[in-house]
Amino acid sequence: MPVVREFRLPDLGEGLTGAEVVRWMVEVGEVIAVDQPVVEVETAKAVVEVPCPYGGVVTARYGGVGEEIAVGAPLVTVAVASSAGSVPRGPDEPGVVAAPAAPAAAEVERPLVGFGVAEPGRGGRRRRVGAAAPAPAVVAVAPAAGSAPVGVPAVVGPAVVPVISPLVRRLAREQGVDLTALAGSGPDGLIMRADVERAVAAKAAGPAPAGAVAAVGAVGQEGVVPLRGLRKAVAEKLSRSHREIPAATCWVDVDATELMALRRQLNATPGPKVSVLALLARICTVALARFPELNSSVTADGSGIVRHPAVHLGFAAQGERGLVVPVVRDAQSRSTEQLGEELGRLTEAARSGALTPAELTGGTFTLNNYGVFGVDGSTPILNHPEAAMLGVGRIVAKPWVHQGGLAVREVAQLSFTFDHRVCDGGTAGGFLRFVADCVEQPGMLLRQL
């Protein structure tokens, strides 16, 4: 006799209560293997593929694209094959009718493994070269008590799309390309990036579909873009920060000529290249050791201040989903080169959308390099519940009084925003002045190391 298993949305990270369905990766009636991704969801932290710990025939799926599902709510139900290798309809199981046998692995229940952001080279569906596609399954869906599957047909024939790369799937989704309509140019008909790009070019050359024109017109008329996923989470967090934290900002112009010269000197020697951000991160860790009250946060009820023993350094990075703040763990124990390597790794992950929820949470202090946008200054909103943020503007050649004369120097503006509850202006000014002195005279760091 088959056993119908209900797979619920697992806890996807710290403080997350739900996720929005981005794309279903399986159909009702499809035979799936243990640990096969069944749905792609967007949380406030990342876009992730969720694998199912059961193998068998999908009998129902819950939630439509764009719908938010709460943690612990049903995602899919799976009829796990019996040892006889079939899923017959039993007298007490009106929701399941005859379906093809699942693979041998489908009879095994495993803990949820492989969870996280889509890995390069890992497709949404598993395929074996030379293996025949599973026969269409006929499944009558019986809703679970208290909930109902959304938008699921009663009779479905699974369509296995020959595409492995998650980047190819994402490109197709963003460009509105139907992968099932493409003929792959890769081995065994595998769909490659070039196939999707050709389809995009052909689509651009032809007339726009009427539905697409209507959709664009509707957005233009209404002028309302719904807050969802990451954008919604950012809006809620910034609003809370603005409501709860009495923030103040101070700033100073600095001569970064010597710091830039030091960077050129370091990068002239063999070894990993050192970025300006890595040097600034190292300066921040030293400054926070001198002013530990700034590496803190106020308790939720406002009755106390939590001093954090480690510096988990967040930094603003522009990703494909917008601005995110990855976190370098234990930054105070890393060398400048190690900081540079971790900053580079997290920046690349942000650009490709591969950051995990754990890499986007737990920060205690933020370094915001808005100079990459070509601006000089900013008064940012603090990354709640952190108590401080250092902002760095663009480094640009300007006239500057140097050693009693006028010279062209590389100048930047530093701004420091802090929670006035954790310290007064003297502490904040002392921190910013120390950072500025280290930028202007990098040799000062040797006295602190």
Image (spheres, grey):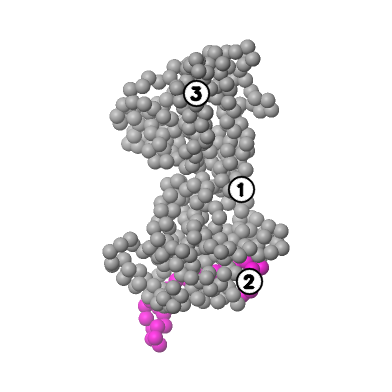
> How many marks overall?
3
CA gap between label 3 and label 2 equals 60 Å
Q: What are the residue bounds of the magenta stretch?
A: 399-425
Task: Classify 10 Å Cα crowding around label 1: few (below 14), some (14-19), many (20 and above).
Answer: few
- Element at badge 3? helix
In the image shown, does 319 or 96 lie closer to the viewer?
Answer: 96
Label placed on residue 107: 3
Q: Is residue 334 left or right of residue 420?
A: left
Mark 1 or 3 closer to N-term?
Answer: 1
Residue occupied by mark 1: 15
The kind of residue tagged 3 is Glu
Vertical arrangement, residue 172 with respect to residue 223, above or below: above
Vertical arrangement, residue 250 with respect to residue 169, above or below: below
Dominant SS in magenta: strand
Residue at 40 percent of width and 65 percent of height:
336
Mark 3 or 2 closer to N-term?
Answer: 3
Q: Any magenta on residue 368?
A: no
